[in-house]
Amino acid sequence: MKLLEGKTGLITGGARGIGRAIAIAFAKEGANVAFSDMKVDENFQNLEKELNALGVKAKGYVSDASNFESSQTLVDEIVKDFGRIDILVNNAGITRDTLLMRMTEEQWDLVMNVNLKSVFNLTKAAQKYMLKQKFGSIINMSSVVGVSGNAGQSNYSASKAGIIGFTKSIARELGSRNIRCNAIAPGFIISEMTEQLPEEVRNDWVQKIPLRRGGTPNDVADACIFLASDLSSYVSGQVINVCGAMNT
């Protein structure tokens, strides 16, 4: 039996990068997959086709995770289509990196809304169904910079640190109903987001990593499979660093 067979997972920001890798990994382990993103484009359509080709039920949804009402509607639609939500992966996120002296209020608010408020929105919406089921695994995508901080990323670091505090609190709140909540803190992951960095910056990051390589979206997806499956049935309120020992 596959590790996630019979379960339904929702991945926000699922059409590309880490979210896409998680969606495919879940489907390969037998999960039905719902994913959301901001718009229907080629990546969105191709992922939906690829997931269905793996023999599971899969559907993409257009939704703004930073919007409370949109998130409520999304979860209600998924439960109507799939019957349940067993796994929630709060993966939607953006960066607006700059030094604090140059950072605008808009850059601060946008990162907070997309990265942190979205986690509140989706968890709030999904918990009512998980409470009825008396089962659920919530996986929140934090970052090593949410643990250690990073110059030029005060907005991003603060949002990701907030996710860790939220995760630990929800694990305490919902644990008695058999609902687990954990966070993953990726390090330097080779993705569309990091490919926008200058080559010398990417090389500098790699040299700081004891494993001497950047991570891949699949490295993060593998950790998600562990947290989504019964292999981690006694793991809750934890932060798993997927960073090649960059943050120890």
Image (tube, helix red, strand yellow):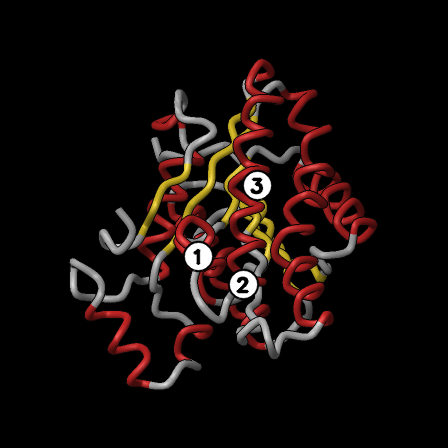
Residue at 51 percent across and 57 percent down: it is 157
Contact check, label 1 and label 2, Cβ < 8 Å = yes
Of residues 30 and 187, which is closer to you in this image? 187
Q: Position of residue 125 (x, y in %)?
A: 73, 38
- The label nearer to you, 3 versus 1, is 1
Q: CA distance from mark 3 to mark 1?
A: 26 Å
Residue at 34 percent across and 46 percent down: it is 241
Of residues 39 and 45, which is closer to you in this image? 39
* N-term mark: 1 or 2: 1
Residue at 47 percent across and 61 percent down: it is 20
Residue at 57 percent across and 48 percent down: it is 90
Residue type beneath disc 1: Gly
Q: Please identify the residue farthest to the left as the structure is shown.
A: 211
Residue behind mark 3: 88
Q: Please identify the residue farthest to the right as the structure is shown.
A: 69
Disc sitting over residue 154 in the figure:
2
Q: Is residue 32 left or right of residue 244?
A: right
